[in-house]
């Protein structure tokens, strides 16, 4: 969150959210190891904005997305949605909150039941939340098809009779059915052809404007989130290492990991970039460490080209730099 964010603007607030998975103890050690998928994440999402969450595969971003809408139980921390702490609500008390926050999944093929007709898939949340009688539900489903650019004549088709982009539109229609305030979109275009990605991203943008939606947009590709996000959070090994306004973060990355991710985005140089954005790709050496055995000190130190002695001794906290950026680095690239 930027330093200027006020409480009134915040729709979603995560405070020190953790999701740890205890593993079975192996034969040699009695101590149970713990996979730290999400490890102390705090962020805020303002109403009407898009927060992009970016990181490599396995960094915990999808798990975090599921924690934010409580599709996964938190190990620790707290999530407030629309002023209400949802992290401890019972299933019964969570039910009336659920329509306000929805998830769009990465793989439309896998997330749609292949044995159900598209219209029935979109109708499902309406029936669960008792939207109205059969005629009202049918009208609403036809309206949702229209909103996402699908023909109402195709309501009775099965998912396999649609293209990949159309299937994702069905997923979006299902998410919109309950008039949510917040949509967490987990890699919603990464399974689509590049030519279709732009169409679906445009649809997200149009829907946000039309329905004043708030998005958390998860992606592994900084190039994709740039075009849809107001702010971006960069994740590494279950932690946020940088968070800032999109264009500022692109022009002047503060964290060495963000700098490396940016260097992998093709055609990024639009003539406005600072010297901190490398024109040559930075190839990170070493493997992403196992989240079961995170490095001491800075989690990025085993791959960071700028690592110094202090980095192994002291874990950097996410703090606000003089320029207003939040970054977790002892030696940020900008002040
Ligand atoms: Fe690199 Fe050290 Fe900063 Fe970590 S704290 S990102 S190791 S310079």
Image: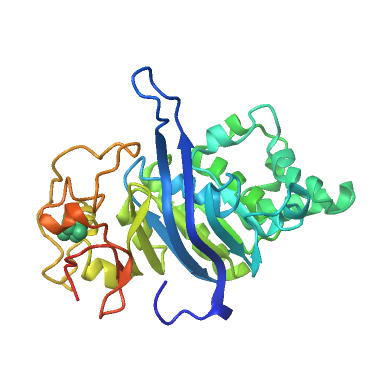
Could you tell me how many numbered marks the image carries? 0
Identified at 85% across, 53% down, the residue is 136
In the image, residue 138 sits, relative to residue 308, either above or below, namely above
x then y, percent, for residue 45: 50, 67
Q: Quadrant of residue 30?
A: top left
325 sits to left or right of 201:
left
Q: Nearer the viewer, residue 304 or 186?
A: 304
Question: Is residue 135 something one can see in this rendering?
Answer: yes
Image-quadrant location for residue 170: top right
If the picture is divided into quarters, which one holds ligand 1?
bottom left
Quarter containing the N terminus: bottom left
Q: Is residue 308 left or right of residue 316?
A: left
Q: Along the horizontal axis of the image, is 129 left or right of 89?
A: right
At a point 48% along the width and 45% down the height, the residue shown is: 19
Foreground of the two, 122 or 27: 27
- From this viewpoint, which residue is outermost toward the top? 27
Residue 107 appears at what percent x and percent y? Answer: 50, 38
Q: Is residue 256 visible?
A: no
In the displayed structure image, the side of residue 134 where residue 211 appears, left or right? left
């Amino acid at each position: 969150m930027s330093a200027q964010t006020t409480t009134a603007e915040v729709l979603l607030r995560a405070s020190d959210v953790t999701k740890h998975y205890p593993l079975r103890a192996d034969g040699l050690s009695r101590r149970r190891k713990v996979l730290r998928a999400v490890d102390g994440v705090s962020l805020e999402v303002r109403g009407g904005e898009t927060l992009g969450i970016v990181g490599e595969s396995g960094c915990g971003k999808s798990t975090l997305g599921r924690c934010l809408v409580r599709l996964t139980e938190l190990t620790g921390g707290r999530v407030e949605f629309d002023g209400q702490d949802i992290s401890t609500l019972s299933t019964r008390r969570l039910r009336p909150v659920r329509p306000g926050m929805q998830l769009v999944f990465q793989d439309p093929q896998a997330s749609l039941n292949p044995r159900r007709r598209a219209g029935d898939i979109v109708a499902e949340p309406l029936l669960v939340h008792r939207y109205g009688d059969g005629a009202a539900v049918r009208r609403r489903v036809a309206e949702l098809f229209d909103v996402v650019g699908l023909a109402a004549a195709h309501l009775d088709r099965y998912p396999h009779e649609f293209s990949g982009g159309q299937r994702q539109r069905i997923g979006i229609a299902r998410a919109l059915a309950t008039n949510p305030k917040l949509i967490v979109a987990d890699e919603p275009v990464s399974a689509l052809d590049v030519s279709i990605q732009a169409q679906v991203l445009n649809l997200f943008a149009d829907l946000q404007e039309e329905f004043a939606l708030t998005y958390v947009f998860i992606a592994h590709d900084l190039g994709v989130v740039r075009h849809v996000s107001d702010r971006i959070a960069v994740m590494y090994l279950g932690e946020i290492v940088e968070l800032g306004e999109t264009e500022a973060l692109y022009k002047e990355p503060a964290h060495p990991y963000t700098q490396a991710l940016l260097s992998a985005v093709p055609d990024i140089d639009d003539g406005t970039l600072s010297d901190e954005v490398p024109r040559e790709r930075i190839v990170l050496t070493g493997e992403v460490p196992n989240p079961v055995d995170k490095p001491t000190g800075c989690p990025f130190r085993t791959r960071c080209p700028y690592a110094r002695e202090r980095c192994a001794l002291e874990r950097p906290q996410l703090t606000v730099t003089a320029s207003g950026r939040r970054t977790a680095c002892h030696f940020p690239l900008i002040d």
